Image (tube, helix red, strand yellow):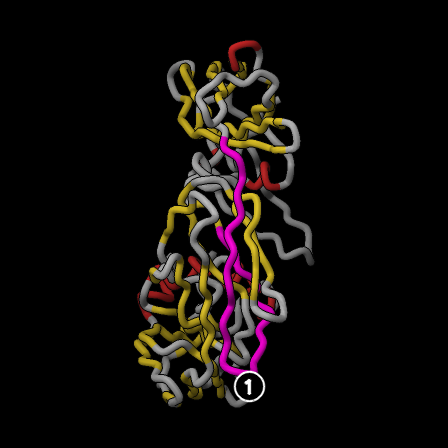
Amino acid sequence: MRSTPYPDGTELSQASRIVWRGEEDLDGYEIRLRAVPEFHIRGTVVDEAGKPVEGATVKLAETDGAAPVLLSLGQTDRQTTTQAGGAFELSAVRPGEWLLAAEWQRANQSLGGAATGRVSRGDWEGVKIRLDAPFSVRGIVETPAGAKARSVVLVSALDPSEALPGASGTADVEGRFELRDLRPGRYRITTVGPQDRFYLDSIRFGGQEVLGQSVYLMDASLPVRVVYKTNGGRVLGAVEHCAAVLLFPKDASLQTASFVRTARCDPGGRFEMGTLRPGDYFAAALAAPELESLEQALDEILFDPQIVSDSRIARSAESVRVEAGQSTAVTLQLMPWPEE
């Protein structure tokens, strides 16, 4: 059996989006099956010294350039085990972008590695997956004197062929945290913290600012330093018939859950947001969404902040300058809720 992304694609990147809110049935969707050619993937798995590894597990999952959800759930399209000389082969592979993730247990140590590639008009030959031992990165979360923040620090792999799948660590009462089971690769470091009391000011790795940037992690030698501050700015205003206000940084690299903010308007159309990181933002007042609750729609934006830059919101929003410790009143025009 072969999967077909809705409505009739042969690759994951061709799939159309379906939004299900969990409150009603979805009807009228038709998936049209298509016949596609099938190919083989052949390669070898080696350890960190370049020696072939026999008995390693190689898992296959389709990807569109990000780590597949299937692998994070422990599911795969299929898998195999390396034979003598570290060789492996996977058959009946349809065209598409694929991720190969290899794992091998050596004594009490688990090694892993990955490779990505495209299958199109022929077999994918000569794949070489190098295994590396995992490592941990430690760090500290700093807050104003006397304050505590139960922040969660996250790292996500930017290239699934280099590092899979990422890690998270929760700061203890003294602000210390540890990111475990990382493998060499390029990551983005983000946080989930208490937005009601602090704003995220800085993330430094080995003394260099990496907030909103990618960073290459390769060992446990350099620490991560996360800094929260108080005395953030406030944005307020009133818009007739407003359901919610969306505020997000102009800097696309900061359009993440740490900085994209939403607020419900009260019955009089008034809104207010506080503890904002100083900087330049876009603000938009939105009418109530159709066919779903406001809470569900706002949750979707926070879960996937790129919605703000991929829709007409970004093109019609107003510019707002947020200053530390100051309140900024803004005048906004009501916008319809963006279409899916």
Q: Position of residue 165 (x, y in %)?
A: 53, 42
**Front residue (pair 262, 135):** 135
**Residue situated furthest front in the rendering:** 221
List the residue tagged with mark 1: 266
Give amino acid for label 1. Asp
Q: Nearer the viewer, residue 91 or 334?
A: 91
| Residue under the image location 56 percent in, 9 percent down | 84
**Residue at position x 51%, y 77% in the image:** 263
Image: 241 above or below 27: below
Name the residue: 43% across, 30% down: 116
At which x and y percent is residue 329? 37, 89
Q: Nearer the viewer, residue 48 or 330?
A: 48
Which residue range is magenta in the image?
A: 132-155
What secondary structure is marked by label 1? loop
Q: Is residue 13 within the magenta segment?
A: no
Q: Residue 260 placed where, x, y %?
A: 45, 68
Q: Is residue 177 left or right of residue 48?
A: right
Which image quarter: residue 146?
bottom right
222 w.r.t. 151: above or below: above
Q: In which quadrant is the N terminus drawn?
A: top right
Q: Is residue 133 magenta?
A: yes
